[in-house]
Amino acid sequence: MDQVGDGAAAMERLSGEGPYEMALLDLMMPGLTGLQILEKIPLLPHRDGLAVVILTAKGQDADREAAFRLGARDFMTKPFSPKKLLARIRQLLDAS
């Protein structure tokens, strides 16, 4: 598991060859937002099928719709239960 502090660093990691099955993104990351990263993931053929979960304090319907349209598998609004997040991660990874 890797953790980065901004969207540019997240995009750098995803552009590399690390073996990632899932990315947890925030909509309001500095540098690049979670939606901007979602737009760029299809340009990375080696990330085809990457499960992306958006975790955010910004829960407007427009953001949720945009995230799903761009390929997010789930959208969780803060605060959320860590148990629910772990259950959802397990469910998404098992479905991959």
Image: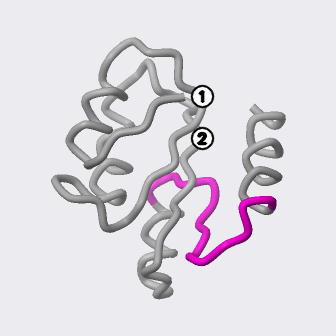
- The quarter holding residue 8 reads top left
Q: Is residue 33 left or right of residue 87?
A: left
**Image spot of residue 58 (x, y percent):** 43, 81
- Graded by Cα atoms within 10 Å as few (under 14), some (14 to 19) or many (20 or more), the crowding at tag 1 reads some
Question: Residue beneath label 1, please?
Answer: 21
At label 2, the amino acid type is Ala
Q: Is residue 36 left or right of residue 14?
A: left
Question: Residue beneath label 2, please?
Answer: 51
Assess whether mark 2 and mark 1 are in contact (beta carbons under 8 angstroms). Answer: yes
For the point 54% across and 55% down, the residue is 72
Does residue 81 lie above or below 40 as drawn?
Answer: below
Does residue 46 lie above or below 77 as drawn?
Answer: above
At label 1, the amino acid type is Glu
Please tell me whether residue 76 belongs to the stretch shown in magenta.
Answer: yes
Give the CA distance from mark 1 to mark 2: 6 Å
The image's colouring method is one colour
Question: The residue tagged with tag 2: helix, strand or loop?
Answer: strand
Name the quarter where the C terminus is drawn: top right
* Upstream in sequence: badge 1 or badge 2: 1
Question: The residue tagged with tag 1: helix, strand or loop?
Answer: loop
- Graded by Cα atoms within 10 Å as few (under 14), some (14 to 19) or many (20 or more), the crowding at tag 2 reads many
**Image spot of residue 73 (x, y percent):** 62, 53
In the rendered structure, find residue 3 and report the number of the disc placed on it: none
Please tell me whether residue 41 belongs to the stretch shown in magenta.
Answer: no
Range shown magenta = 70-83
